[in-house]
Image (spheres, helix red, strand yellow):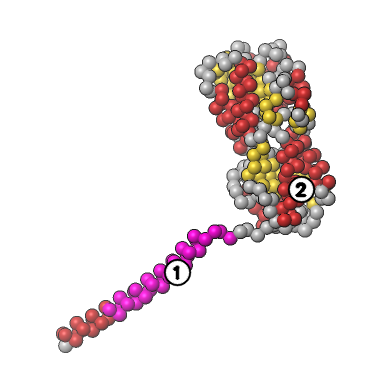
Amino acid sequence: MEKFKKVFVLVMSLCLMGLAFAGCGGDNKTAQSGSSGSSSSAPVQKALTGGGSKIVYIITPSHSNPFFKTEADAAAAKAKTMGYEVKVVSHDDDATKQSELFDNAISDKAAAIICDNAGADATVAAVKKARDANIPTFLIDREINGSGIAISQIVANNYQGAKAIAEVFVEKMGEKGNYAELLGKESDTNAGVRSSAFHEVIDQYSDLKMVAQQTANWEQTEAYQKAETILQSNPDIQGIVCGNDTMAMGAIAAIKNAGLQGKIAVIGVDGSDEAAAAIKDGSMTGTALQQAALIAEMAVEQADKYLKDGTTGLEEKQLVDCIAITNKNVDKLKAFVYKE
């Protein structure tokens, strides 16, 4: 009997082992299948075909800033020549308002959205919402923190442009002296990129010392106020670097009010007509032209091609080089367009 029990236990053990191996074999087959699937290329996303109308929504920050007005006007003009209706609206750098405008575009069954966005993080959800509604978004000027959501992200090469104009600033300063910096809106990735590029050039010179750094949120009035305070606290200041031309205009106004016109080097980024005039009269050292009209037109052209062909034929993220503008070439600049 004892012998029979031993045989019975042995047989049952073998059976259980067989079942275990059979189970592992089944799992292994599944795992291999999964492995095979993961090694193949990811499925290509189906092209978006638009909401059904011929409306192109153009969403930008406030048109009180000539840069944003230029890109909106250029995009609208290009879209009309291509046979589209246009709706031009502004989110005023308010992410909640931007979300509402995207909802309006979806409700209007927009063919496509051209957007200079209200925040690198805050805009992701809005672009996804449009994508889910079969509407492609083409971003200009500012990137978002995400890929594969917008069809194109076409931006000025802020890093290259800021470095180029920083080199002009260093030369104007004679590689020494005290300076201040006016920063753009913290939620805008361009603000950080430009500031980093400025410092990559300027910080190489130990005799150039930054004595103040203030955020002026891209605004002229705020820049005037911040620059006025900086000048009062630092009477020996010799230069001000500004994240955009609008803030540079505020700084220049404060410099004039302090009776220091022409004595303080000022640089900006954008390439506005106001900056061009200031460069001509000697109150501004230079600016880095972002080709706003060109970038906006590129976005519309890519939207049209995408809607017709299902692809732009280009990478999602595209950089357009800036042009350093000084008194040597300022006559070639008008309305954010540089002509040789």
Q: Secondary structure at mark 2?
A: strand
Q: Earlier in the sequence, mark 2 or mark 1?
A: 1
46 is higher (above) or lower (below) than 149: below
Q: Identify the residue under disc 2.
A: 57
The foreground one among 65 and 310 is 310
**Where's the C terminus, which quadrant?**
top right
Indicate the quadrant where residue 153 lies. Answer: top right
- Residue 63 x %, y %: 77, 36
Using the rendered image of the protein, determine whether residue 304 is visible from the camera's viewpoint.
yes
Q: CA distance from mark 2 to mark 1?
A: 47 Å
- Is 48 left or right of 174, judged from the image as shown? right
**Seen in the image, is 314 located left or right of residue 70?**
left
Residue 30 tag number? 1
Residue 84: x, y in percent?
Answer: 82, 50
**Residue 270 against residue 3 in the figure, above or below:** above
When the figure is inspected, residue 300 is found, relative to residue 51, above or below; the finding is: above
User: Could you tell me which secondary element the residue under label 1 belongs to?
Assistant: helix
Q: What residue is rendered at 66% in x and 23% in y?
A: 267
Q: Determine if residue 195 is in view.
A: no
Based on the picture, tell me whether residue 84 belongs to the magenta stretch: no
- Determine crowd level at label 2: few under 14, some 14-19, many 20+ residues with C-alpha closer than 10 A: many
The quadrant in which residue 48 appears is: bottom right
Magenta residues (range): 14-43
What residue lies at 73% left-to-right and 16% top-to-bottom? Answer: 282
> For the stretch drawn in magenta, what is the main secondary structure?
helix
Hey, which residue is sitting farthest front in the picture? 340
The residue under the point 58% across, 21% down is 212
Three-letter amino acid code at disc 1?
Thr
